[in-house]
Image (cartoon, helix red, strand yellow):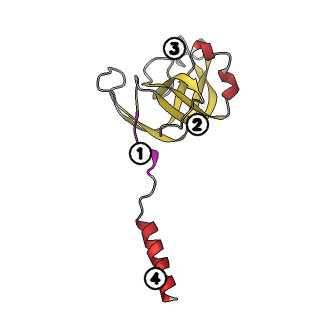
Amino acid sequence: MILVLGRLVAVIFAIALSPAPLPAQEGEWLAFYPSVARIQGKLIKIQKYGKPSYGENPEKDETVEVAILILKSPVRIKANPASSVNNQSLANISFVQIIFPAEMAKTHGQYFDQEIVLAGNLVRGHKGEHFTDVVMEVKAINPTGKPLY
């Protein structure tokens, strides 16, 4: 009985001291353009005000649908010091605006309200039509390989 109890205590002690999986903010870093990142989450669309003043004059501004990927877990993105736009690292990114290329315009709608994996280039949101801190310019939907976070 003492031997079994001793082994049980040893197992509990070993589990307590084993390293826990790291949260996304402490795990590996994703990288900004030109690197390709794979991210996973639920694709949704939201309404935002667009041109000409992006909400400053709602009665005159167009309304646009914006694709957003709500990430399965927050990510960190490492700065690219050679870039004038992507030169600051970001942490705790929970959602990313998604920009699909023209050739995916007719097919990407089927993925809304679903969990998907996207591959593409991450850039800092810096234009009027960028509504989040990070934007992904998509290269592939549901690529082979697991998400890189």
Q: Which mark is residue 53?
A: 3
Indicate which disc, 1 or 2, sits on the residue closer to the N terminus: 1
Real-space Cα separation, disc 3 to disc 1, in angstroms: 39 Å
Q: Which mark is residue 6?
A: 4
Marks 3 and 1 close (CB-CB < 8 Å): no
Label 4: how many Cα within 10 Å (few below 14, some 14–19, many 20+): few
Real-space Cα separation, disc 1 to disc 2, in angstroms: 17 Å
Indicate which disc, 3 or 4, sits on the residue closer to the N terminus: 4
Indicate which disc, 3 or 1, sits on the residue closer to the N terminus: 1
- Please name the residue that numbered disc 2 is placed on: 41
Q: Magenta segment: does it hold 62?
A: no
Q: Answer left or right for 117 relative to 28.
A: right
Q: Is residue 61 visible?
A: no
Real-space Cα separation, disc 2 to disc 4, in angstroms: 44 Å
Query: x%, y% of residue 128?
Result: 48, 17
Marks 4 and 1 close (CB-CB < 8 Å): no
Indicate which disc, 2 or 3, sits on the residue closer to the N terminus: 2
The amino acid sitting under disc 2 is: Gly
Q: Is residue 26 above or below residue 109?
A: below
Q: Magenta segment: does it hold 25?
A: yes
Q: Answer left or right for 73 relative to 27.
A: right
Disc 2 is placed on an element classified as strand
Q: Which residues are magenta?
A: 22-30
Which one is in front in this view, the residue at disc 3 or the one at disc 1?
1
The amino acid sitting under disc 1 is: Gly
- Please name the residue that numbered disc 1 is placed on: 27
Q: Residue at x 43, y 51 (%)?
A: 22
